[in-house]
Amino acid sequence: MRILISGICGFAGSAIARALAAQGRGYEISGFDNFIRPGSEGNRAELKRLGIRLAHGDLRAASDVDALPAADWVVDAAANPSILAGVDGLTSSRQLVEHNLGGTVNLLEYCKRNRAGFILLSTSRVYSIGPLAALPMRVVGGAFQPGGGALPAGVGPAGVLESFPTSAPVSLYGATKLASETLALEYGETFHLPVYINRCGILAGAGQFGRPDQGIFTYWINSHLRKRPLKYIGFEGKGHQVRDCLHPSDLAPLLSAQFATPGTAAADRIVNVGGGAASAMSLRQLTDWCDDRFGPHPVASDPAPRPFDIPWIVLDPSKAGLVWGWRPRIPVQSILEEIAAHAGAHPEWLEFSAPLG
């Protein structure tokens, strides 16, 4: 089976490629990347050693995608993953749309031409900001938890379900991913292609950029270790906001199950893929972990809110378990230790991760 991965030399793409290769299923894995991010060359060398074929190409250029060899499945792991993309002054809104939505169109046309299946790595940020921000919250053990009032449809004890609203606003980033989901499903129905949507929570692990807008676990651990300034922003400046995390290599078993299934019920094509409640923690709890691991380090407080911030989002991955027999396997403590070990070995990682411009 021939597998093509977009953004293969990025954090998620490279981890998925390595994990798929390690399964020993005989996949012919290839991928392409534009190699503009720091660190992509290092991933490139490692993947080549594994016998994975790599090509240089820009997802936004239809001619680059058209020139790629045929594959049986495409895994779209390329995106600008920042919730602040298009509004942070570092990237334009047009660039965000061209990359995250225009790139998906180019891949879907590739799949139509080659009769390939398509798997989109989407995001929890397709869920509506307003209803998430309005969830009744209580603080338990230094972390927000839903409670103190009736929960709306689409939220259960284990987290946010796939049925939670996706109406605007979801941020420009979330909108590009939600539009990509819709187009992918329509291409699948119209051209009879297998299409699956995996809505991921925060992906985390060694080698991820340490940036607060897209790699908060890595950023926090690296900053704490180096005694860099840290700040709890918004929500009274106490660090109670909560996210769950998932190691990207945990996606490989799910992808393999999807590769083996040429089609399934339309209602089952979208699943949450997150670490769930077992991997969820607040910034306050992450600071406590870092204090125990590295020694105490003070964190400042800034209660002023920021655009698109929400107090709590934990994905309930139970549907992925029912449909695909999938569950996260790498516990959060192992993910944090992996990041900490990488941080210790790469003292320049924060500077390396800094955005250009």
Image (cartoon, rainbow, N blue to C red):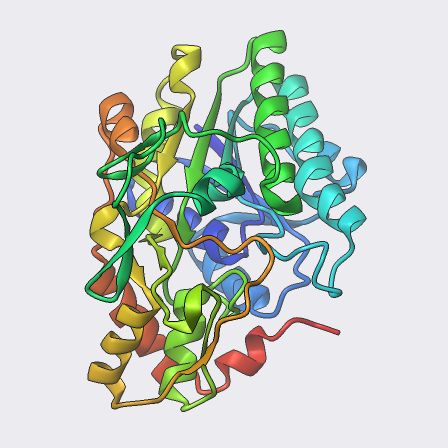
Please indicate, yes or no, whether residue 122 appears anywhere in the rendered image.
no
Check the image and report above or below for 305 versus 194: below
Check the image and report above or below for 189 versus 68: above
**Going 44% across and 44% down the picture, which residue do you hit?**
134
Q: Tally the marks.
A: 0
**Going 69% across and 38% down the picture, which residue do you hit?**
103
Q: Position of residue 192 (x, y in %)?
A: 56, 8
In this picture, residue 285 sits left or right of residue 121: left
Check the image and report above or below for 113 versus 29: above
In this picture, residue 271 sits left or right of residue 328: right
The part of the image, by quadrant, that contains residue 28 is top left
256 or 210, nearer to the observer: 210
Q: Position of residue 338 (x, y in %)?
A: 29, 69
In this picture, residue 132 sits left or right of residue 4: left
289 or 36, nearer to the observer: 289
**Going 63% across and 38% down the picture, which residue do you hit?**
175
In this picture, residue 206 sits left or right of residue 291: right
Q: Position of residue 23 (x, y in %)?
A: 28, 42
Where's the C terminus, which quadrant?
Answer: bottom right
